[in-house]
Image: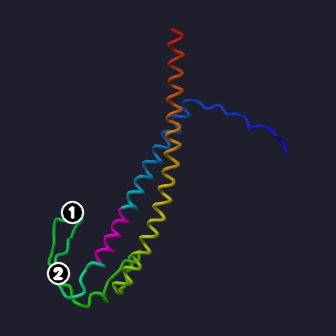
Amino acid sequence: MSSEKPAKRVVTLEELVGRASELRDQLNSLNTVLNMYLTQYRETQLSIETLRGLPEVSTESFVVLDRLSSVFIPVKIEGNWVNSVLVNLGLGYYMRTSREKAVEILSRRARELERVLSNLQAQQKALLEEYLTLERLISQVIETYRAKATKST
């Protein structure tokens, strides 16, 4: 077994700044994806809560037509609606099912989204740690250059 140490590699300031820039771009992209999945998760949770909270008897209400809650239309919900729920399965496919089954499908989707969010947050943390480490190192190098420039004048 050899006790050789790995060779040291000299990295320029430009390389450090370039890597920091790459990491910043990756973090921005990752934040966009994270926000998209977080929105999906919140919408899924809202759907579950709404399904669970609707009364099983016939009722009249209003349904919002847009995400800004600008327009509502009146609707009448029939008493047997709990056995006639359409749930999005993905890729444009829907399934008519019961409220309980729809909640089960949405709950599975929410758990999967939680797993994806957890993985994305772990990636974000690793990238951010590397970025902050590089940022500190770049600051130290710049301060060293400034100190040398001050001494030589």
* Residue 152 point in image, percent of width and height: 54, 10
Task: Examine the structure image and report whether residue 121 is included in the region drawn in magenta.
Answer: no
Q: CA distance from mark 2 to mark 1?
A: 19 Å
Specify the farthest residue to the bottom. 80
Q: Which residues are magenta?
A: 39-51
Q: Is residue 47 above or below residue 133?
A: below
50 with respect to 7 (left or right)? left
Work out which quarter of the rendered image holds the N terminus and state it.
Answer: top right
Identity of the amino acid at label 1?
A: Leu
Secondary structure found at label 1: loop
Look at 54% across and 26% down and name the residue there: 141
Look at 21% across and 62% down and name the residue there: 68
Q: Is residue 90 above or below residue 8?
A: below
**Dominant secondary structure (helix, strand or loop) of the stretch shown in magenta:** helix
87 with respect to 131 (left or right)? left
Q: Which residue is mark 2?
A: 75
Q: Which residue is mark 1?
A: 68
Q: Earlier in the sequence, mark 2 or mark 1?
A: 1
